[in-house]
Image (cartoon, helix red, strand yellow):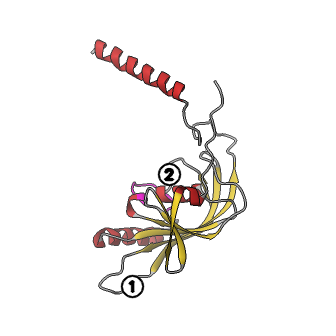
Amino acid sequence: APPPREINNPTPAANAAPTQEGGVTLFKTKSGLKYIELREGSGPTPRYGQLVSISYKAYVKLPDIKGKPSKLEEFDSDRGYLIKHGNGRIVPGLDEGIHTMKLGGKRRIIVSPKLGYVEPGLGPIPEGPLARMRLNNLLDKMVEVRGGNVVFDVELRTVMDDEADLGYYGDSSISPEDFNTLRINVQSSMGSKAKEG
């Protein structure tokens, strides 16, 4: 079989619409993720399946209540957090925000509730029990006030291939011919099961 085709990783401007807010350029993707490019890196962007090391500070920003502005409330930080990019084990908005960063770049990623801690076990999770309790309390408060965002200040430190990767991840799309073959196989499989049942 031919090797999978690579899809070029889009640049931040290519997949997000920039707007000006308070003198800062804020990018917004189609999913609703927002980010501010603090420093554009000069290296490559990560591909799904690669190992990525980031340093970050994580906050919750509750909405302003009754005209009283709320502050960023830090709940976690790490100087060397290692992830397998695209494996579904971190906050979806953080994964999406990292995907278009360049090595050496810094970005503030503003994650809406629908792209945040939407399932149990998603990282990053604070190490200590008191910090975890703080995160849980802040997330409960977001639910209570029906708003807010999780905010990550991220620096992309390392991007490397995973030598143990079996090729399940990839920024490639299936060819129309392979898709048609897959569709025919699934349909014929479903037809055989219907005849058996």
Please determine whether, in this image, residue 73 is positioned above or below residue 43. Answer: below
Counting labels gives 2
Mark number for residue 193? none
- Camera-side residue of 144 and 43: 43
Q: Going 47% across and 71% down the picture, which residue do you hit?
A: 131
Could you say whether the residue bearing mark 1 is in a helix, strand or loop?
loop
Badge 1 density bin: few <14, some 14–19, many ≥20, Cα 10 Å: few
**Amino acid residing under circle 2:** Arg
Residue at the (44%, 20%) spot, across then down: 185
Question: The N terminus appears in which quarter of the rendering?
Answer: top right
Which residue is the site of mark 1? 69
| Camera-side residue of 176 and 133 | 176
Range of the magenta residues? 115-125
What is the three-letter code of the residue carrying label 1? Pro
25, 45: nearer the viewer: 25
Q: Which mark is residue 89?
A: 2
As displayed, is residue 190 above or below residue 109? above
Q: Residues within 10 Å of mark 2 (few under 14, many from 20)?
A: some
Residue 135: image quadrant is bottom left
Q: Position of residue 116 (x, y in %)?
A: 43, 60
Quadrant of image for the C terminus: top left
Question: Which residue lies at the image location 62% right of the left edge and 59% below the top edge?
Answer: 101
